[in-house]
Amino acid sequence: MIKLNRTTAAQIMAAIIPFLGVAGNADTANAISREDQAYASSPYDYCDAKKVAAVWGISVSRAKSVIGRKILQGNQRLLNADIDSTARSVRCSIVDIGLSYRDAEKLAAYWGRTSSDAKAKAAAIASQYGGGKFRIMMAHVIGRR
């Protein structure tokens, strides 16, 4: 078995991403469109894309396509593993998870904290688990996206 360090593995994966699941020029636009649509209609958000980008060593924009591709291929377990692997290394902000002022107020009331404290706690939870998981965990408070 060949052992690769994280950087080398990320560089290899970044090099092959354009070739995964895309048949040719005519199919490329459709595949990208399907991937972008899958990402946009999923619970995953910018925070998750930021985390996947860090794992794969790619841009956040490309990470959104990777997320969409993994959703379409039924690989959410692998996607979640990528997101989980960055729990201590990638920080997300309330902007990254699309938290509105009203959402922060709802969370503050739920947690019995100030709005500022609720924003900090929300960012910490999203940094730990990912924005999509945060939204799922807190859907009963802030509603679904």
Image (cartoon, rainbow, N blue to C red):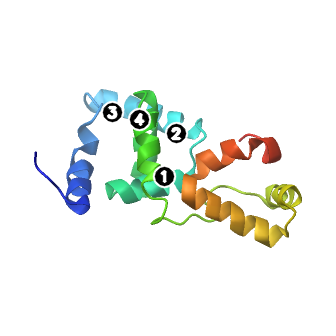
Between marks 4 and 3 in the image, the one whose residue lies nearer the viewer: 4
In this rendering, the answer to whether 144 lies above or below 129 is above
Q: Nearer the viewer, residue 3 or 53?
A: 3
Indicate the position of residue 91 as horizontal and vertical percent values.
53, 66
* Residue at x-position 68% and y-position 46%: 135
Which amino acid is tagged 3? Answer: Thr
For disc 2, the marked residue is 39
Pointer 2 with pointer 1, Cβ within 8 A: yes
**Dividing the picture into quarters, in which one does residue 24 lie?**
top left
**Label 2 to label 1: alpha-carbon separation:** 9 Å
- Mark 4 or 1 closer to N-term? 1
Q: Secondary structure at mark 4?
A: helix
Residue 49's disc is 1
Residue 37's disc is none
**Label 3 to label 1: alpha-carbon separation:** 21 Å
Instruction: Left or right? Give the position of 17 relative to 64.
Output: left
**Label 4 to label 2: alpha-carbon separation:** 9 Å
Residue 70's disc is 4
Which amino acid is tagged 4? Answer: Lys
* Residue at x-position 70% and y-position 65%: 121
Indicate the position of residue 130 as horizontal and vertical percent values.
56, 52
**Label 4 to label 3: alpha-carbon separation:** 16 Å
- Mark 4 or 3 closer to N-term? 3
Indicate the position of residue 40 as horizontal and vertical percent values.
57, 40
**Dividing the picture into quarters, in which one does residue 4 lie?**
bottom left
* Residue at x-position 33% and y-position 54%: 56
* Residue at x-position 83% and y-position 68%: 115
Q: Specify the quadrant that holds the N terminus.
A: top left
Are there few (<14), some (14-19), or many (20+) residues within 10 Å of tag 4?
some
